[in-house]
Amino acid sequence: MIEVLPAFAPRFLEGLVVNLEIAMASLAVGAAAGLPLAALLASQGLPARAASLIVAALRAAPTFVVMFFLLNVMPRDYAPFGVVVRDWGMIAVILSQAVYAAAYIADNGAAALRSLRAGDTAAAVIFLPSLARAFCVLLMSSGVAAAVGIPEAIFITIREAERMPDIADRVALCLTVMLFFAVLMQSAFALIDRARSRLLRWLERSSNPAGR
């Protein structure tokens, strides 16, 4: 397997860029939908109850089901606002991921708003590192794009493994990629936790300047 790595690594990194693009786009779309829902959840009365039902539905929607539903519903020759869309598969993946992102942002955003109104700035600001965690989750789950042939990192890994005649090499390649993602995600979560701790310490010092 060692001999294929020099050629495989650049293609894999190109695929990883696609994963990053999917995660960023999904988080952006999720924020556009989730932040208004967060404001409604943090309100009172009928708007809060309606938003709660919507968020519950978003939270329960399986990503795979949403993705394939969108792929089968969206006509291939549909051109919204006269714009011809070349890759409905990518859009379906982004929107299916955005469903999770919207529910996550709505839940955490509403909690942040309630904390802010209660005067607990520290608890409210935790919403920011929670967005970074959501991005990491979206990055990992963006591998579902392989199911519709989008050339992201998992798709490229599967294609490379299929070309290997030796099953031991296939297993070794897959384990290497799994180890890469494990290290990447654990490092990212460690950085997020460190940033969260520093942010909380900074807020504590800012709110209590006499205790410096």
Image: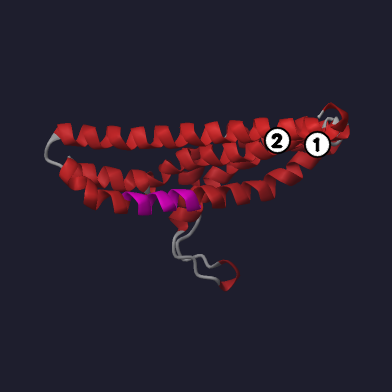
Is residue 142 left or right of 149 when viewed as pictured? Answer: right
Return the disc, 1 or 2, that comes first in the chain's sequence: 1
Residue 119 position within the rendered picture, expressed as x and y whole percent measured from the top left: 87, 31
At 56% across and 48% down in the image, what residue appears?
26
Occupied quadrant, residue 68? top left
| Three-letter code for the amino acid on which mark 2 is drawn | Leu
Is residue 187 left or right of 133 when viewed as pictured? Answer: left
At 60% across and 32% down in the image, what residue appears?
194
From which residue to which does the magenta span run? 12-21
Residue 211 visible in the shown view? yes
Residue 43 position within the rendered picture, expressed as x and y whole percent measured from the top left: 85, 36
The residue identified by callout 1 is 113
Residue in the foreground of this view, choosing between 38 and 83: 38
The residue identified by callout 2 is 199
| Tally of marks | 2
- Check disc 1: other Cα within 10 Å, few if <14, some if 14-19, many if 20+: many
Magenta includes 175? no
Residue at the farthest bottom position: 82
Residue in the foreground of this view, choosing between 144 and 18: 18
Residue in the foreground of this view, choosing between 12 and 93: 12
| Three-letter code for the amino acid on which mark 1 is drawn | Leu
Residue in the foreground of this view, choosing between 13 and 93: 13
Residue 117 position within the rendered picture, expressed as x and y whole percent measured from the top left: 87, 34
Under circle 2, the secondary element is helix
Q: What whole-number distance in Å separates the C-alpha atoms at marks 1 and 2?
A: 18 Å
In this rendering, is residue 40 above or below 119? below
Instruction: For marks 1 and 2, give the one nearer the viewer.
Output: 2
Occupied quadrant, residue 57? top right
Q: Quadrant of the N terminus?
A: top left
At 22% across and 33% down in the image, what residue appears?
172
Residue 52 visible in the shown view? no
Per the picture, the main secondary structure of the magenta-coloured stretch is helix
